[in-house]
Image (cartoon, rainbow, N blue to C red):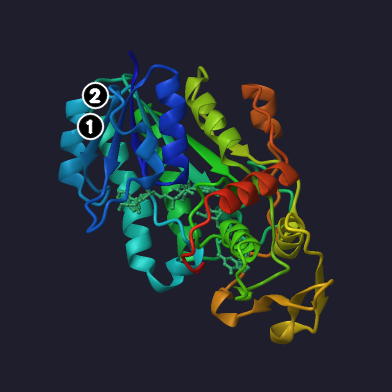
Amino acid sequence: MKKALITGITGQDGALLAAFLLEKSYEVHGIVRRASLPNTARIAALLGHPSLHLHYADVIDAAAMITLIQTIQPQEIYNLAAQSDVLLSFTMPAYTLDTNASGTLTLLEATRILPKNSCRFYQASTSEIFGNHEAPQTEQTPFQPVSPYGISKLCAYWLVVNYRQAHGLFAANGILFNHESPLRGERFVSRKITRAVAAFAHGGTTPLKLGNLDARRDWGHSQDYIRGMWGILQHSTPDDYILATGTMHSVRTFAELAFGHIGCKLQWQGSGLQEKGLDAKTGQVMIEVDPAFFRPVELHSLCGDASKARKILGWEPTINFEGLVADMVKNDIENYKSAAYV
Ligand code: NAP
Ligand code: F7E
């Protein structure tokens, strides 16, 4: 039985990856952080599975991570732990770099001192490393990150490349573009929108406050990207791959599609900070612009070219933008709880 260690198992991707690997009969180990309230809601359905083992640790704690990895001796490590909120990275830059960059270094060192060639390492890299470079982005596109988050992840990216070259480690970067699911964190724009739609569907009246409506992203479904992460580690040689859908939509389009699921056709009125999204039928204000959600530096458009992953790994996304939005809205309407969206 193969053993995998997942850092970030309590997050969106970690929870989906844990279920995917358990399904493939892996012994799955995950690290959880000590929190004052339980933080295992996303893996609740997996708790008690005989092949799932959780350990308290933090990627910032080198001693704990090295001891743990020596004890488990995994064949695969998926480093998904991160301070992954781009806007927050501007207010918590040091913490973001400690977790995302130094944390990755700790894990690479811990992997390097395992018996040679015994363990493969996957790094959760991101399209944020490209910054505002012209779309579509490929593995050859120059890196120009525009946030502490992007910078921290670029540092981790190069550490992975360096450990591969210098120490012969099987270490690979998955450069993943935005991917969402019903498990997406509530501060990310996709989930913020689908939760607001659910609130309106259940009689809510509070307008949803958003930032830059014209930012464009390449949004895919996390389920497809989990399969890609695993595929990257199963290939005969370690390399870096983009996973993306190759299509791009604006936040505005995401909102129009999501609100459409409750029979609301959005009509935009005004401009700049005064712009509002109204229900075309009733005139009710559904969306307002709030500068609190603007970034000090915005990344305007991201669209990935995943040709390399398609050709070498045979990876294909199976859920399109419309399918993703439908899945998220349906889930939020069904599981609606009246907590305010942030
Ligand atoms: P997420 O939902 O924010 O999950 C992050 C995970 O990291 C959580 O389990 C969190 O634990 C854990 N974590 C944070 N700081 C930690 C620390 N110091 N030590 C140990 N664990 C820590 O992120 P996600 O969307 O699943 O993304 C997974 C990874 O892919 C992240 O590295 C992210 O940066 C990267 N990525 C994501 C996307 C995307 O669109 N989703 C795209 C490209 C790359 P708690 O639950 O305790 O907070
Ligand atoms: O923002 C705009 C915002 O926070 C997307 C992370 O998983 O993907 C994610 O980072 C866009 C941005 O994701 C709001 O300005 C408008 O342009 O959902 P997001 P992100 O910043 O793209 C990458 C690939 C990662 O690696 C990250 O870890 O939407 N936007 N209004 C808003 N964004 C938020 N959060 N909230 C708004 O109200």
Res 132 → quadrant:
bottom right
Residue furthest bottom in the image: 274
Res 262 → quadrant:
bottom right
Q: Which mark is residue 81?
A: none
Res 42 → quadrant:
top left
The answer to whether the beta carbon of the residue marked 1 is less than 8 Å from any atom of ligand 1 is no
Compared with 154, 44 (above or below) is above
- Residue 285 point in image, percent of width and height: 71, 78
**Amino acid at pointer 1:** Ile
- Residue 137 point in image, percent of width and height: 69, 48
Distance between the alpha carbons at the discs numbered 1 and 2 = 6 Å
Visible in this render: residue 171? no
The answer to whether the beta carbon of the residue marked 2 is less than 8 Å from any atom of ligand 1 is no
Please tell me which residue lies in front, 46 or 280.
280
Residue depicted at x 76% and y 46%: 247
Compared with 193, 113 (above or below) is above
**Amino acid at pointer 2:** Gln
Residue depicted at x 59% and y 64%: 199
Q: Are marks 1 and 2 in contact (CB under 8 Å)?
A: yes
Q: Which mark is residue 73?
A: 2
Element under label 2? loop
Horizontal side, residue 90 vs residue 107: left or right:
right
- Residue 333 point in image, percent of width and height: 60, 53
Q: Which mark is residue 69?
A: 1
Residue depicted at x 47% and y 41%: 13
- Residue 34 point in image, percent of width and height: 22, 52
For the image, the number of numbered tags is: 2
